[in-house]
Image (tube, grey):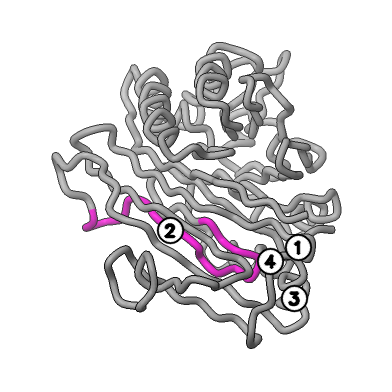
């Protein structure tokens, strides 16, 4: 059965300094509260977001247990707003430290944690232990996977997530990913949601097409400008003929084949309601809402999108 879910990906600035962890967590809390107005089913935070801005050895020193103070704080928001949260952090487990992607459910409870299988050399030298298996988690809307940053360079990890039934892979990272990230989405036919501290964040469909993108880039920041919502972006996707037929069985027949995208804004060109989407359009209506931020307020950007999970995309 088709399910439409709402996904948010968050980007927050590097804080640095002796109070970096508290500042980063506080920024994430403010942004989750802001994103909650969009009623997301799941929110993704950037890789090791509490220690962004610290050196790798400093970050390892600040690693916390799971469950622990940070997952309790983020879990309280997950419970308050009824959302799942991908909460990446450095996890201290006995004598070892892992780069972890922790999944919190709508009640704020720890569903599980994925440990980054391929840490960078800097991480290994600072004492980060590699994980040993890909994790796929069952949620109330479907199965999701979590892979982290340098895992992008190892296609087998993505294959394992797909074989485990992941329909959406969340990819918290320290960098944007670029074409390789789009290739992973396309090769393994899964939605990919990235979240980074500074670079662009993306929500990619199963062809690698960016449904929504946002993030800090050089020359784009406006000091003193607070985050604002500036309209809806509507994207209709139609894929190859065979897949269109399967979508049509669920959501109504659509014409044509190949990949087609039309983007419009409320009140813009396109001739239909919401500027570019006509009444009666079917099969994979994807919505995104854009926000922007300068360093004056929280120094954060979020991006929200609806994803239609169709039976044709399931394992």
Crowding at mark 3 (Cα within 10 Å: few <14, some 14-19, many 20+): some
| Mark identifier at residue 68 | none
Where does the image place residue 192, in percent across and percent down from the top left? 61, 55
Where does the image place residue 2, in percent across and percent down from the top left? 72, 56
Classify residue 199 as left or right of residue 312. left
Where does the image place residue 21, in percent across and percent down from the top left? 42, 21
Q: Which residues are magenta?
A: 203-220
Classify residue 220 as left or right of residue 239. left
Q: Residue at x 67, y 29 (%)?
A: 98
The relative height of residue 243 versus residue 109 in the rendered view (above or below) is below
Instruction: Give the SS element for disc 3.
Output: helix
The answer for how far apart the CA atoms under marks 1 and 4 are is 14 Å
The answer for how far apart the CA atoms under marks 4 and 2 are is 26 Å
Q: Residue at x 15, y 43 (%)?
A: 223
Crowding at mark 1 (Cα within 10 Å: few <14, some 14-19, many 20+): some
The relative height of residue 116 versus residue 110 in the rendered view (above or below) is below
Say which of marks 2 and 1 sits in front. 1
Say which of marks 4 and 3 sits in front. 4
Residue at the disc numbered 4: 251
Residue at the disc numbered 3: 243
The answer for how far apart the CA atoms under marks 4 and 3 are is 12 Å
Residue at the disc numbered 2: 213
The answer for how far apart the CA atoms under marks 2 and 1 are is 22 Å
Of callouts 2 and 3, the N-terminal one: 2
Residue at the disc numbered 1: 313
**In front: 315, or 216?**
315
Crowding at mark 2 (Cα within 10 Å: few <14, some 14-19, many 20+): many
């Amino acid at each position: 059965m088709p399910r439409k879910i709402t996904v948010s990906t968050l980007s927050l600035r590097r804080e640095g300094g002796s109070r970096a962890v508290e500042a980063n967590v506080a920024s994430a809390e403010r942004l989750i509260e802001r994103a909650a107005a969009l009623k997301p089913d799941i929110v993704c935070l950037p890789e090791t977001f509490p220690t962004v801005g610290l050196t790798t050895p400093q970050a390892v020193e600040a690693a916390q247990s799971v469950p622990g103070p940070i997952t309790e704080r983020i879990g309280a928001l997950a419970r308050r707003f009824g959302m799942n949260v991908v909460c990446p952090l450095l996890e201290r487990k006995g004598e070892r430290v892992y780069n972890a992607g922790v999944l919190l459910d709508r009640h704020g409870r720890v569903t599980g944690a994925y440990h980054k299988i391929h840490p960078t050399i800097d991480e290994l030298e600072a004492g980060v232990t590699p994980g040993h298996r890909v994790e796929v988690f069952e949620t109330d809307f479907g199965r999701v996977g979590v892979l982290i940053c340098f895992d992008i360079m190892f296609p087998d990890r993505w294959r394992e997530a797909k074989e485990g039934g992941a329909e959406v892979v969340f990819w918290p990272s320290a960098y944007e990913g670029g074409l390789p990230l789009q290739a992973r989405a396309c090769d393994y036919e899964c939605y990919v949601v990235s979240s980074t501290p500074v670079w662009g964040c993306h929500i990619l469909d199963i062809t690698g097409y960016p449904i929504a993108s946002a993030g800090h880039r050089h020359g784009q920041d406006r000091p003193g400008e607070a985050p604002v919502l500036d309209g809806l972006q509507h994207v209709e996707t139609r894929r190859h003929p065979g897949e269109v037929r399967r979508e049509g069985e669920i959501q109504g027949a659509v014409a044509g084949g190949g990949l087609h995208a039309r983007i419009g804004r409320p009140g813009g060109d396109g001739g239909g309601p919401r500027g570019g989407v006509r009444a009666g359009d079917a099969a994979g209506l994807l919505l995104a809402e854009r926000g922007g931020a300068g360093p004056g307020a929280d120094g954060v950007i979020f991006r929200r999108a609806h994803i239609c999970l169709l039976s044709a995309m399931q394992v």
